[in-house]
Image (cartoon, rainbow, N blue to C red):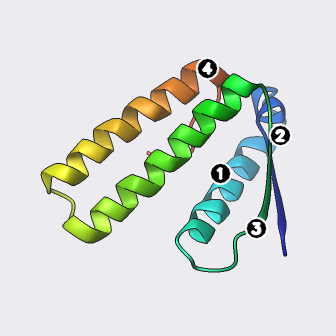
Amino acid sequence: MEKVVIDLYEYKLLKEGSLANFGASLKYTLQAMFGYFRAPNLTIRGTSGDINKFVLALAGEKKHMESYLKHGLEDPRTLRDKYKLKNAVSAFERETGIKWPFK
């Protein structure tokens, strides 16, 4: 089983390549959530507030994608989930100072 480490503290420091690594780790995790392959051994590091906002944003991404696949892009339920995702991403960015890699 592959191990994925998402270190929010490291991403705050904006080390070279760390934001690309963040996006890749997040993409891999989302793909696993949708069953493209076996879920990785996921470790998230950071403050409890950072982790909480990250999990809410990640869950929002999943919910919005599920709604899009089930109902289509212009369905009111999909638009509602997109709005909730936008709020979760904004909260994550405010809490951590890290730019969410998907828009």
Q: Which x, y percent locates residue 54?
A: 61, 37
| Upstream in sequence: badge 2 or badge 1 | 2
Q: What element carries label 3?
A: loop
Q: Residue at x 14, y 56 (%)?
A: 75
Q: Is residue 15 above or below residue 40?
A: above
Q: In this view, does 67 lie above or below 9?
A: below
> Can you say which quadrant of the picture contains the N terminus?
bottom right
21 with respect to 52 (left or right) = right
Marks 1,3: beta carbons within 8 A: no
Q: Which of marks 3 and 4 is in front?
A: 3
Amino acid type of the residue tagged 2 in the rendering: Glu
Q: Is residue 46 above or below residue 7?
A: above
Q: Nearer the viewer, mark 2 or mark 3?
A: 3
Q: Can residue 34 be seen in this view?
A: yes
Amino acid type of the residue tagged 3 in the rendering: Pro
Q: Is residue 102 visible?
A: no
Identify residue for label 3: 40
**3D distance between C-alphas at marks 2 and 1:** 13 Å
**3D distance between C-alphas at marks 2 and 3:** 24 Å
Identify residue for label 4: 95
Identify residue for label 2: 16
Identify residue for label 1: 23
| Upstream in sequence: badge 2 or badge 4 | 2
29 with respect to 40 (left or right) = left
| Other-residue count near label 4 (Cα within 10 Å), few / some / many at <14 / 14–19 / ≥20 | some
Q: Which x, y percent locates residue 78?
A: 24, 53
Q: Nearer the viewer, mark 1 or mark 3?
A: 3
Number of on-image labels? 4
| Other-residue count near label 3 (Cα within 10 Å), few / some / many at <14 / 14–19 / ≥20 | some
Q: Is mark 2 on a helix, strand or loop?
A: loop
Amino acid type of the residue tagged 1 in the rendering: Gly
